[in-house]
Amino acid sequence: KNEVEQSPQNLTAQEGEFITINCSYSVGISALHWLQQHPGGGIVSLFMLSSGKKKHGRLIATINIQEKHSSLHITASHPRDSAVYICAVPPYGGSQGNLIFGKGTKLSVKP
Amino acid sequence: DTEVTQTPKHLVMGMTNKKSLKCEQHMGHRAMYWYKQKAKKPPELMFVYSYEKLSINESVPSRFSPECPNSSLLNLHLHALQPEDSALYLCASSAGRHQETQYFGPGTRLLVL
């Protein structure tokens, strides 16, 4: 079964800084998900990516399928980016619908 | 409409109560999920419905009983819960195809006394 490791577990940044969150997994996959969870619970799906890079506003996600590694970058970070960022992958590789979640990276951006 | 709604937002129940959590989506998605999330932990998959049929049950105790009355609705019936079942219960849906994005609801925060 796939194992997901995220780093760092906690991250504190000053407003405006460039942020990088990393995710590694053990079993080859077809797609990886990045999710955002704000205090209070709701989860928002940020990206689903199979290869290369995706960009949405100040968020950029990259994946290297051969190295089983993905990164989430936030440019010009803002206090409203403070949240838990979670990486998720299919449990047995391939493209199963259900997901295994990393433990999350708690980001706090100070003004 | 890309929204998954969940009711209630908060629920407090005793160990002898019977209650239900509800989840609804109108995106035409054919896969729906229940997750349980304890504080400071990632979500854990409980159940998956695909085309209104239960396709995955991750060894969840029988005091949790899912129901999918139609393709837009997903219920989770609760009976004789334990205090350790207190958690955030998240519903999600996806198109049902492979490699699809999951859309999450805001969750129901459950407290069992």
Image (spheres, coloured by chain):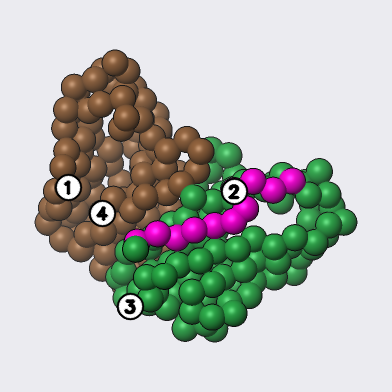
Chain colours: A brown, B green
Q: Chain of mark 2?
A: B
User: Magenta residues, as a range?
Assistant: B2-12
Report which residue position mark 3 lands on: B97
Circles 3 and 1 in contact, beta carbons < 8 Å:
no
Q: Residue at x 78, y 56 (%)?
A: B81
Q: Main secondary structure of the magenta part?
A: strand
* Kind of residue at badge 3: Arg
Q: Horizontal and vertical percent for residue A11? A: 34, 27
* Kind of residue at badge 1: His
Please rate how many residues cluster around mark 1, counting C-alpha atoms within 10 Å: few if below 14, some from 14 to 19, many from 20.
few
Report which residue position mark 2 lands on: B9
Q: Is residue B37 visible?
A: yes
Please rate how many residues cluster around mark 3, counting C-alpha atoms within 10 Å: few if below 14, some from 14 to 19, many from 20.
some
Helix, strand or loop for disc 4: strand
The span from disc 2 to disc 4 (Cα, nearest Å) is 26 Å
Q: Residue at x 42, y 49 (%)?
A: A43
Q: Nearer the viewer, mark 2 or mark 3?
A: 2
The span from disc 4 to disc 1 (Cα, nearest Å) is 9 Å
Q: Nearer the viewer, mark 4 or mark 1?
A: 1
Tell me, yes or no, whether dots 2 and 3 are on the same chain: yes
Report which residue position mark 4 lands on: A47
Please rate how many residues cluster around mark 4, counting C-alpha atoms within 10 Å: few if below 14, some from 14 to 19, many from 20.
many
Circles 2 and 3 in contact, beta carbons < 8 Å:
no
Whether B35 is drawn above or below A35: the answer is below
Which residue is more in the foreground, B10 or A5? B10
Q: Residue at x 69, y 70 (%)?
A: B65
Q: Chain of mark 1?
A: A
The span from disc 4 to disc 3 (Cα, nearest Å) is 17 Å
The span from disc 3 to disc 1 (Cα, nearest Å) is 23 Å
* Kind of residue at badge 2: Lys
Q: Nearer the viewer, mark 2 or mark 1?
A: 2
